[in-house]
């Protein structure tokens, strides 16, 4: 691959995972200067498997066209088949995960800084950020 990324066991930043998979993102917010939010769109076919280190951001997946095969394991989620098109999954920051995917797909990945989620919860919904827990979410069909 020839891309630099975090060392084994080091925290993974919002777009570091792009350096770990064998394909490029079709579009990315990298270098746009966004604060607390990064985004990447992926359409790929090669098989890839990844057991990333600890992530420091929440990761929200929107499956526009799910991959042909998907194994996804994280915090109470064990998925062995792709979700429906239009569904959403959420991988909370700090959750260990294993991902294996293959086949054509169209996914939007959003990386949210935990502090941003807490601030929005506090400001928009009058929630105390100290009590906020972001739960794992799998295959919510919108």
Image (spheres, helix red, strand yellow):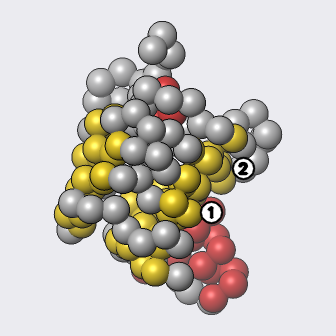
* Left or right for 19, reference 121: left
The answer to whether the residue labelled 2 contacts the one labelled 1, judged by CB atoms less than 8 Å apart, is yes
Label 1: state its secondary structure: helix
Q: Sequence order check: which comes first, mark 2 or mark 1?
A: 2
Mark linked to residue 62: none
Picture quadrant of residue 136: bottom left
Question: Which quadrant would the N terminus be assigned to in this image?
Answer: top left
Q: Position of residue 80 (x, y in %)?
A: 21, 60
Residue under the image location 65 percent in, 74 percent down: 120
Mark linked to residue 116: 1
Q: Nearer the viewer, residue 142 or 54?
A: 142
Residue reaching furthest top?
A: 2
- The CA distance from mark 2 to mark 1 is 9 Å
Residue under the image location 43 percent in, 26 percent down: 22
* Left or right for 20, reference 27: left
Q: Which residue is mark 2?
A: 35
């Amino acid at each position: 691959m020839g891309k630099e990324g975090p060392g084994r066991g080091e925290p993974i930043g919002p777009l570091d995972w792009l350096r770990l998979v064998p394909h490029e993102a079709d579009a990315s917010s990298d270098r746009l200067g966004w604060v607390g939010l990064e985004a990447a769109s992926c359409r790929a076919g090669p098989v890839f498997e990844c057991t990333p280190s600890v992530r420091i951001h929440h990761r929200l997946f929107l499956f526009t066209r799910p991959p042909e095969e998907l194994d996804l394991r994280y915090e109470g989620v064990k998925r062995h088949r792709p979700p429906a098109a239009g569904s959403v999954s959420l991988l909370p920051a700090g959750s260990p995960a294993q991902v294996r995917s293959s086949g054509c797909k169209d996914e939007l990945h959003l990386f949210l800084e935990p502090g941003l989620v807490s601030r929005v919860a506090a400001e928009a919904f009058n929630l105390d950020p100290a009590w906020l827990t972001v739960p794992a979410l799998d295959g919510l069909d919108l």
